[in-house]
Image (spheres, rainbow, N blue to C red):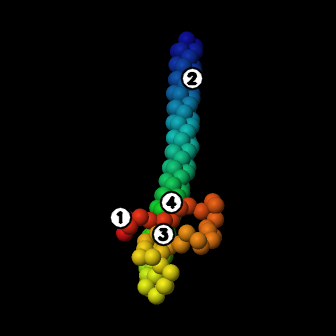
Amino acid sequence: MNTDIVLWIIVGVVVVAVLLVLALVLSRRRESDAKVEDNRHRAEEHREQAREADLSAREREADALRVQAEAQQAQVEAERLRNEGERRRMDADGVRAESEEHLRRADEIDPDTDGQSQSESGGRRDDAPDTRRADAPETRRDETTR
């Protein structure tokens, strides 16, 4: 009977040891599964952050391209305005030259001129009425600037 009791005690200890080992293995497996699941979750969070960063980078690139296009458009507009200003200046120079030519011809044929042409005196005779506006800038030129 003594051996039966010892045998049952050994069987009980072995069963308890097997159960402990089994519990330990299952516990580690659950921890491992939880860790794997946690890693999956963190990896998905990193992927989401990467997608958001990529979207933000593409938005910034598009914004940069838009600003560059606006700058280029402004340069084209500035060039167009420069050309228009130059054309208008040339038109004004032509009109001014034509006006001076008319004054010179008038001075040549005017019997009342005393040797000094109206174009040399600024384009007006002293007895001619002043039709310039008071707020207009002075546009007379000396002979030295011609």
Q: Local crowd at mark 3 within 10 Å, few (<14), some, or many (≥20)?
A: few
Rendered view: 54 above or below 133: above
Select label 2 or label 1 by which is in front.
1
Residue 67 has which mark?
4
Disc 2 or 4, which lies upstream in sequence?
2
Disc 4 or 1, which lies upstream in sequence?
4
Disc 3 or 1, which lies upstream in sequence?
3
Disc 2 or 3, which lies upstream in sequence?
2
Residue 144 has which mark?
1
Question: Which residue corresponds to the image point at 41% horizontal and 76% vertical from the top-left?
Answer: 115
Residue at mark 3: 122
Question: Which residue corresponds to the image point at 46% horizontal and 82% vertical from the top-left?
Answer: 107
| Tags 2 and 4 touching, CB below 8 Å | no
Select label 3 or label 4 by which is in front.
3
- Seen from the viewer's position, the closer of residues 12 and 16 is 16
Examine the rendering and report whether any part of residue 129 can be seen. yes
Q: Secondary structure at mark 3?
A: loop
Left or right of 119 on screen, residue 55: right
- Seen from the viewer's position, the closer of residues 56 and 115 is 115
Quarter location, residue 90: bottom left
Q: What x and y, as percent, mark residue 4?
A: 56, 17
Q: Secondary structure at mark 2?
A: helix
Disc 3 or 4, which lies upstream in sequence?
4
Disc 2 or 1, which lies upstream in sequence?
2
Residue at mark 2: 16
Q: CA distance from mark 4 to mark 1?
A: 49 Å
Q: CA distance from mark 3 to mark 4?
A: 50 Å
Q: Secondary structure at mark 4?
A: helix
Q: What x and y, as percent, mark residue 92?
A: 48, 76
At label 4, which amino acid type do we have?
Answer: Val
